[in-house]
Image (spheres, grey):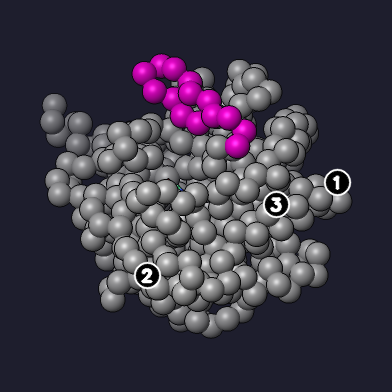
Amino acid sequence: MRKIFLATAALLALVSCTEKFDDLTARVMDVARQQCILMDERLADNVMPKTFKDGINEDSPLKWWCSGFFPGTLWEVYQATGDEEILAIAAKQTLKLSGICHEDTHHDIGFQVNSSFGNAYRATGDPCWLPVIDSAATKLAGRFIPAAGIIQSWKSSKKWDCPVIIDNMMNLELLEYASKLFDKPQLDAIACSHADVTMKNHFRDDYTTWHVLAYDRSNGDVIKKQTHQGYSDDSAWSRGQAWALYGYTMMYRETGHERYLAQAENVADMLLPRLPGDGIPYWDFDAPKIPKELRDASAGAIMASAFVELSTLTKDKAKSKAYRKMALRQIRTLSGKEYLAAPGENGCFILKHSVGSIPGNSEVDVPLSYADYYYLEAINRFNTLED
Ligand code: GLY
């Protein structure tokens, strides 16, 4: 009996390894399309999907940092399928966020607007999407602190007067995009300053990154190096490493500055040997009970998307091959039964098994909207690669 079971498991593994990428794309996009339509039907006008736990959907207000990811997911499905019904839903869900370009209490407006309005403009070329991108980039740039050379992430608190989190690298994409769209070189200058100061202060010698740095806003001195969502101040929180990989890859794509490519490769080369065999990281690389710790599908999806892009940018053929191989492994794992939902289940989200914050005891082993978004982006990016 055990032999039959092992033979069946081996056969299934072989089938999933040999599935043509076109077939994988069609299968996943079909699930994603169905889930998105169901999600849209259940979603009220004043909220966005946040997660699903114990059979109940939890939604977020529109100003929540993740509000752009459901619209972004819809734009990714539209890109892959050209489905007109999805296009209409994507436009409707994006327009819900028109007011958030006035939000200036956190840095996440970059995530929110780039994945929604940014993708809307990239997909359609319709100038109706531009004013929100322009206003949001201006608001984000308003958080720049010249004496420290960084964009402040969160509001000042008793714990951190001027906190910057590694996640903030992701918001620079909106600045770079707006800089080119609206011919505003000052936005590129702010993004490069933030990326340079982060490169100097936020990384350890082994190219893992701290999560939160607290700066002295008057002179840029670093006061604290800590974590918020990781296992400990000294550990490598997986999603933070993913944001770093994606952020410097994106900054090289946008600016052509070789120092960002070198940093992205340094992070990638640190990650490759530390990732588990199936490519999906535990929630923190230094969590104490590995392999009994939870995986974080969101970190795997973000890394997969970044690895695909980095494989096209590096000039080192061996590295390119290794990054592409890892991206494919991560995409295939996420596209298996363990992670990919069946239509109608999982609260209408696409992927299972992400981790928001274990120290905060919130969103633990659940679906998350950004895991879905970066997973589909990774698949779409992989489809643009030449053989
Ligand atoms: N940017 C917040 C997170 O990655 O959880």
Q: Residue at x 65, y 59 (%)?
A: 142
Q: What mark, if any, has residue 313 been given in the picture?
A: none
Q: Residue at x 48, y 70 (%)?
A: 218
Residue extent of the magenta highlight: 50-63
Q: Residue at x 75, y 52 (%)?
A: 135
Q: Quadrant of the C terminus?
A: bottom right
Residues at circles 2 and 3 in contact by the CB criterion of under 8 Å: no
Helix or strand or loop: what does disc 2 sit on? strand
Query: Which residue lies under the disc numbered 1?
Result: 128
Residues at circles 3 and 1 in contact by the CB criterion of under 8 Å: no
Q: Is residue 367 left or right of residue 107?
A: left
**Which one is nearer the viewer's eye here, 354 or 176?**
176
Amino acid tagged 2: Val
x, y percent for residue 201? 39, 73
Can residue 337 be spotted in the picture? no
Q: For residue 335, which quarter of the picture?
A: top left
Q: What mark, if any, has residue 136 been given in the picture?
A: 3
Helix or strand or loop: what does disc 1 sit on? helix
x, y percent for residue 237? 31, 54
x, y percent for residue 241? 37, 60
Magenta run includes residue 60: yes
Q: Quadrant of the N terminus?
A: top left
Magenta run includes residue 225: no
Query: Which residue lies under the disc numbered 2?
Result: 222
In front of the other: label 2 or label 3? 2
The Cα atoms of the two marked residues, 1 and 2, are separated by: 42 Å
Q: Identify the main secondary structure in magenta.
A: strand
